[in-house]
């Protein structure tokens, strides 16, 4: 049986995202919880490490979850979102560099944007698009499907 050893919690106003992994790093739990379901969910889990971004409500939830026997660690926001954002922008810059080397892309909107805007603006737009795509895939439990090729 795969027992959860680490749970990551993304806090929000009403709906929280919970992601739990076992000792091998395999995903065991991935679900959304409403505010009223949080404590019931953690009561059912064996004691484990729970990580969450330090924000306005994280101290409250941290105390409540620790009272159930879990070990809670709060992470400063500067370590959570900026790192991910930086990785998305670096990846987008890499794609744009390849587009400029090859002279074409399967994404006409990107080629058009590169003609009108700077590389940095295009990279941020591509990074935002990639973030929205990743969120949609996680939220709906789907896999990425490459768009049909439309060379420009």
Image (cartoon, rainbow, N blue to C red):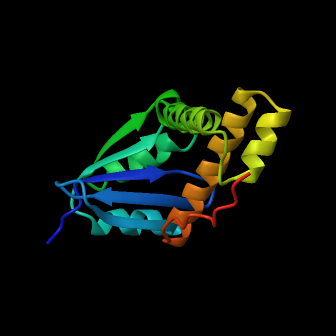
Give the quarter of the image for residue 146.
bottom right
Question: Seen from this angle, which residue lies furthest left?
Answer: 1
Q: Quadrant of residue 72?
A: top left
Task: Locate residue 56, reporting x and y percent.
Answer: 58, 39
Residue 79 lies, with reference to residue 67, above or below; the image says above
Residue 43 visible? The answer is yes
Residue at the spot x=21%, y=58% of the render? Answer: 22
What residue do we see at 17% from left, 54% from top?
23
Label tally: 0
Image location (x, y in percent) of residue 139: 55, 66
Q: Nearer the viewer, residue 24 or 10?
A: 24
Name which residue lies at 39% across and 58% down: 19
Residue 42 place in picture, x, y as percent: 34, 62
Drawn side of residue 6 relative to residue 31, left or right: left
Residue 44 located left or right of residue 103: left
**Along the viewing direction, whichever of 37 and 134 lies nearer the viewer:** 134
Q: Residue at x 70, y 60 (%)?
A: 150
Q: Quadrant of the N terminus?
A: bottom left
Q: Is residue 5 above or below residue 92?
A: below
Tell me: residue 98, above or below residue 140. above
Residue 35 seen = no
Give left or right: position of 56 versus 25. Answer: right
Q: Nearer the viewer, residue 78 or 25?
A: 25
Work out whether residue 41 or residue 141 is closer to the camera in this orientation and state it: 141
Q: Judge left or right: residue 2 versus residue 55.
A: left
Residue 24 in the image: state x and y as whole percent: 17, 55
């Amino acid at each position: 049986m795969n027992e959860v050893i680490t749970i990551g919690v993304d806090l929000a106003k009403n709906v929280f995202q919970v992601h739990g992994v076992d000792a091998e790093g395999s995903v065991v739990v991935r679900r959304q919880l409403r505010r009223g379901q949080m404590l019931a969910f953690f009561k059912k889990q064996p004691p484990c490490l729970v990580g969450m971004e330090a924000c306005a409500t994280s101290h409250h939830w941290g105390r409540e979850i620790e009272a159930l026997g879990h070990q809670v660690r709060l992470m400063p926001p500067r370590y959570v979102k900026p790192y991910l954002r930086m990785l998305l922008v670096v990846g987008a810059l890499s794609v744009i560099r390849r587009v400029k080397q090859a002279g074409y892309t399967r994404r006409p909107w990107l080629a058009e944007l590169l003609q009108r805007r700077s590389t940095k603006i295009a990279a941020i737009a591509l990074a935002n698009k990639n973030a929205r795509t990743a969120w949609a895939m996680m939220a709906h439990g789907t896999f990425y499907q490459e768009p049909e090729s439309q060379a420009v």
